[in-house]
Amino acid sequence: MTTTLTHPADGEGSVQVQQDAAVRMEEGTLVIAVYGKGGIGKSTTSSNLSAAFSKLGKRVLQIGCDPKHDSTFTLTHRMVPTVIDILEEVDFHSEELRPEDFMFEGFNGVKCVESGGPPAGTGCGGYVTGQTVKLLKEHHLLEDTDVVIFDVLGDVVCGGFAAPLQHADYCLIVTANDFDSIFAMNRIVAAIQAKAKNYKVRLGGVVANRSAETDQIDKFNQRTGLRTMAHFRNVDAIRRSRLKKCTIFEMDPSEDVLAVQNEYLALAGRLIDSVEPLEAEPLKDREIFDLLGFD
């Protein structure tokens, strides 16, 4: 049972959906939460990273945490039913569900779940994410999993944003080399550092996406203590893979495609090998404004 509690250590004035102590990930499972500005490419990054982990022989589960439920369609080649929709069909009697009702196999054996969410303005996405993890636990679906990836909805600060932080080992922040993306990243850093006071989650690093250069990201990283773990340029094959409803690993192996595949494999390898957690210090809004850009 999840309850909403005031938890001052999560941040001044924080009221969040707190984790059920009995609903935890399995020991030894690597849990990664992917964050970033809305529309920055979190789902593309998450799905291709899941595919990369699977290519390295890992048993992978990807959980889409956005009500749009479009996180896993490049893995499954379709829009799968959401946990919340399936639960509604059985009047929220979860004991009536089978794993195949809400978990679907995608590319190279990656298991895919879309938590879904309430209609806009009517409920808490954090509750839905919590119920999804609880359902997976009840059906023993986390016991044979090496890597879990949460693909989190855009840069907001509600319970839906915070819930995966209660389960994750590391957070990756996807950003482009521009002011708006980095501004959003700074706020995400602050949220993660607040949650790290009470949970095991730590900052893993930054994924530079859709960017030819990384000079602004590098400037922000140097100032705050972050690091870039992967860099994906604005390669058209990535865009086309979304239109073809497939991962980059299913595209024809051009030079650009192979370079992107290798970067994802390298990122997955770094995460498997263990990442030194970061203790980054977010900036004040005015400080970001003054830091970025050209003189």
Image: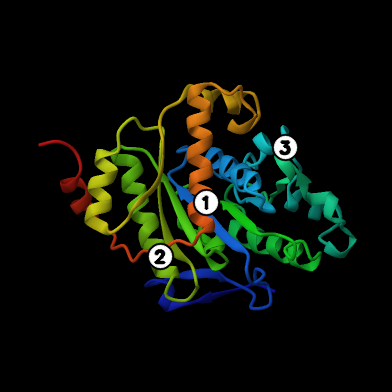
Q: Nearer the viewer, residue 217 or 2?
A: 217
Query: Separation of disc 2 and disc 1 at Cα?
Result: 16 Å
For the N terminus, give its image quadrant. bottom right
Q: Which residue is mark 2?
A: 277
In this rendering, the answer to whether 200 lies above or below 288 is below
Residue closer to the observer: 175 or 110: 110
Residue contact between numbered discs 2 and 1, judged by CB atoms under 8 Å = no
Residue at mark 2 to residue at mark 3: CA–CA distance: 32 Å
Q: Is residue 117 visible?
A: no
Residue type at the position of mark 2: Pro
**What is the x, y in percent for residue 212?**
34, 30
Q: Position of residue 33 (x, y in %)?
A: 53, 56
Q: Secondary structure at mark 2?
A: loop
Q: In front of the other: label 2 or label 1?
A: 1
Reading the image, the residue beneath label 1 is: 269
Query: Image height check: is 24 above or below 71?
Result: below
Look at label 3 and name its amino acid: Thr
Q: Outermost residue toward the left?
A: 295
For mark 3, what is the residue?
76
